[in-house]
Image (spheres, grey):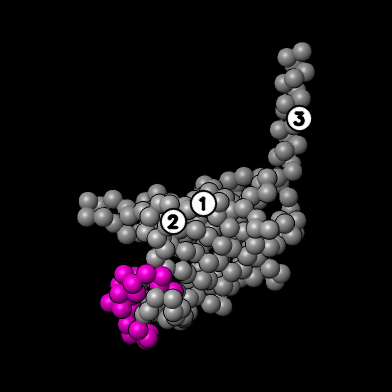
Amino acid sequence: MWTRRAALAMCLAASALKADAMNLDDLKTQLLGHWSSLAPELRPSSLKNPDGSLKPFHLKRDFSYSTGDRFELVVTQYADPMGRVPLARILIRGHMLWRGDHPVAPGAQKVDFVADEAYEVTPLIQGFADLMNQAATQGYAKWEVGAAQSVFGKNFAPFGLAEGKNFMEYDLVHLSNGLLFWGARHIDGRGFDSEANRPTNLQIPLARKP
């Protein structure tokens, strides 16, 4: 009896792996639409506290994927873990470049997100606007709460953007059980700025929006 149960469990596990290992065309079809964070998320930032530890970064994501490999991502940054005090809204729009299988899970794909259409920043609290008015003045109007400004193709020191260069991240995409996973941020604060820094673990997933 135990042997039969074990064999059945192995068959079910193998079937689940095959189900997850969808081909690229199927993945793109299932990816179409809108996705959002389940709850406020926590990840390490590239900024450090006086003691050398990484500052926390609280956010929510709202993502959409459409035909032609186009995407739009809206990230809302918060000052608190519960997402009650919004600091800024960041909008990125561009294209996804598919780079082949990723070994993190069956069916996962390496993807480069290229912001080649739009990159906007909107302060949502006066303190953030004040910070931008100190750190990003040249080539920008006065930063005001609720007023979006395009940083597309410009120097923008707070986010490390360089003039004439599209922002790009070397990431991954995995769909499983109706949830959308990207790569988990490196715990040492490294960005996904090169193939060597492409993530190797899965992040908290996004859920499909109705």
- The residue singled out by tag 2 in the image is 83
Q: Earlier in the sequence, mark 2 or mark 3?
A: 3
Q: Label 3 is placed on what type of residue? A: Cys
Q: Using the rendered image of the protein, determine whether residue 189 is visible from the camera's viewpoint.
A: no
Spatial separation of the CA atoms under disc 2 and disc 3: 43 Å
- The residue singled out by tag 1 in the image is 39
Image point (50%, 58%), residue name: 60
* Position of residue 131 in the picture relative to residue 39 (left or right): left
* Position of residue 89 in the picture relative to residue 160 (left or right): right
Quadrant of the rendering where the C terminus is positioned: bottom right
Q: Quadrant of residue 121?
A: bottom left
- The residue singled out by tag 3 in the image is 11
Image point (32%, 53%), residue name: 54
Cβ atoms at labels 2 and 1 below 8 Å apart: yes
Q: Label 2 is placed on what type of residue? A: Gly
Spatial separation of the CA atoms under disc 1 and disc 3: 35 Å
Image point (68%, 49%), residue name: 178
Q: Earlier in the sequence, mark 1 or mark 3?
A: 3
Q: Label 1 is placed on what type of residue? A: Ala
Q: Quadrant of residue 37?
A: bottom right
Label 2 environment density (alpha carbons within 10 Å; few <14, some 14–19, many ≥20): some
